[in-house]
Image (cartoon, helix red, strand yellow):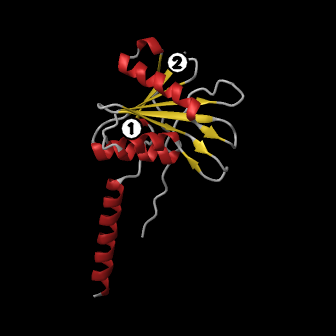
Amino acid sequence: MHCHILAPVRYRVMKHVTDFQSLEPDRQTGARKVLAALDNGINTATGTVIAAVAQTDKGFYLGVTLWLSGTSMAHAEFAAITEAVSAGDREVHSLYLAMRRKDGADPGYVTPCGSCRQLIVDLATFTARPITLYSLNDALDGIQIIEHTELLPFAFGSQTLRRAGEAHRAASAHAHASVQ
């Protein structure tokens, strides 16, 4: 068995920042909906809430942070995507994100956690439809646009499992042939 030491990989997420007025009307609607959804989030631990809106060709689906005990939490991105899929509307093409801090300070742009990034990449792969993320703040003075492919440069997925399975089968066949 050979071990390969990999050099550190540096990557840069390509971020595009635009203003609210330059968005298409349906994107402006998504941005307004995510800001309105912030009022519904609950976070008893820190008070910071995140809202997400998943957009498909059929409509908008809301999700918010739900953190009651400090030990379990529902993520806004997961909730919005689950809402869309539960309605039978799997082809999410846009995801809007916003955060509000309890102290009122500008939280800047919000990006999904690792688990939510994996979910977004998996859904885009499953539906073969790209997902664009729009991250904005309360003031709507800038919107960061990120493509789902930029979230996880070395995403884990079904192809990774297939390659691992093929390598395992090849190694097992080689070991079995060596014994005989």
Task: Compare residues 68 and 165 and report the one nearer the observer.
Answer: 68
Q: Residue at x 53, y 34 (%)?
A: 51
The residue lying toward the viewer, choosing from 178 and 58, is 58
Name above or below for residue 180 compared with residue 166: below
Question: In which quadrant of the rendered image does the C terminus lie?
Answer: bottom left
123 left or right of 134? left
Q: Is residue 23 left or right of residue 89?
A: right
* Residue at figure coordinates x 42%, y 19% from the top left: 28
Residue 3 position in % (x across, y down): 46, 63
Residue 65: percent from left, percent from top? 56, 40
Q: Residue furthest top?
A: 21
- What residue is disc 2 on? 142
Tell me whether the residue at label 1 lies in contact with that at label 2, contact meaning CB atoms closer than 8 angstroms. Answer: no
Q: Which residue is mark 1?
A: 149
Residue 168 image offset from top left, x and y in percent:
34, 69
The residue mark sitting in front, 1 or 2, is 2
Q: Could you tell me how far apart the alpha carbons at marks 1 and 2 are, in whole angstroms?
A: 21 Å
Quarter containing the N terminus: bottom left
Of 121 and 91, nearer the camera is: 91
> The residue under label 1 is which amino acid type?
Thr
Three-letter code for the amino acid on which mark 2 is drawn: Gly
**Which image quadrant for residue 164?**
bottom left
**Residue 39, position as x, y percentages in the image:** 58, 30
Residue at the far right: name it: 103
